[in-house]
């Protein structure tokens, strides 16, 4: 049996996330669970992230509590960091944008200004290793017998 460790949550339905006009245009990207491109219906030159059903992520990271007002931001942030790690997006451009988008989602979802700022500045200081090229989580093998 083959499996991957390191995930806490799995998306139960497709999530579509339109970015604001400040998200830089980039070429279309598609993986098994993520699509990033100019989104139909969101206006000209607007980028959209589609996270497909079944996508797994680890939720909010660090010394924090997984609250409802943190989940959407953590999903979008983890998806963008994954695209950075896989080198679909340039880390020097998109890492700070991913951190800002997490902040924006958290504030829209009613996270307090103080907590959202602590999250944002913690990512700016400590988040770089999570954006380093590393590929996907390692595939592990469980013992199997007949």
Image (tube, grey):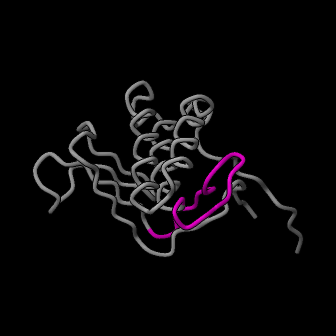
Q: Which quadrant of the view contains residue 124?
A: top right
Rendered-image quadrant of the N terminus = bottom right
Looking at the picture, tell me which residue is in the foreground, 119 or 24. 119
Looking at the picture, tell me which residue is in the foreground, 1 or 41. 41
Would residue 93 be found to the left or right of residue 61 on screen? Answer: left
Looking at the picture, tell me which residue is in the foreground, 13 or 63. 63
The vertical placement of 78 against 96, above or below, is below
Q: Position of residue 103 (x, y in %)?
A: 45, 47
Residue at 57%, 44% (x, y): give it. 119
Residue at 34%, 63% (x, y): give it. 16
The vertical placement of 50 against 104, above or below, is below
**Magenta-span inclusion, residue 58:** yes
Residue extending furthest toward the top:
92
Q: Position of residue 75 (x, y in %)?
A: 50, 57
Principal SS element in the magenta part? loop
**Magenta-span inclusion, residue 118:** no
Would residue 43 be found to the left or right of residue 118 on screen? Answer: left
Q: Which quadrant of the view contains residue 107?
A: bottom left
Residue at 21%, 50% (x, y): give it. 38
Residue extending furthest toward the left:
44
Q: Position of residue 56 (x, y in %)?
A: 57, 61
Rendered-image quadrant of the C terminus = bottom right
Residue range of the region highlighted in magenta in the rendering: 53-70
Badge count: 0
Looking at the picture, tell me which residue is in the foreground, 125 or 92. 125
Residue at 64%, 61% (x, y): give it. 66
The vertical placement of 90 against 20, above or below, is above
Q: Position of residue 9 (x, y in %)?
A: 61, 65
């Amino acid at each position: 049996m083959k499996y991957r460790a390191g995930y806490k949550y799995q998306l139960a339905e497709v999530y579509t996330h339109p970015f604001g006009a400040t998200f830089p245009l980039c070429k279309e990207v598609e993986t098994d669970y993520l699509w990033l491109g100019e989104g139909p219906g969101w206006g000209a030159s607007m980028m959209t992230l589609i996270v497909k059903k079944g996508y797994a992520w680890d939720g909010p990271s660090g010394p924090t509590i997984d609250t409802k007002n943190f989940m959407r931001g953590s999903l979008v942030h983890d998806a963008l960091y994954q695209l950075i790690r896989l080198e679909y997006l340039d880390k020097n451009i998109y890492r700070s944008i991913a951190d800002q988008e997490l902040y924006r989602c958290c504030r829209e979802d009613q996270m307090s200004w103080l907590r959202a700022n602590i999250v944002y500045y913690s990512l700016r200081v400590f988040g770089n290793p999570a954006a380093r090229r590393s590929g996907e989580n390692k595939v592990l093998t469980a013992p199997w017998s007949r």
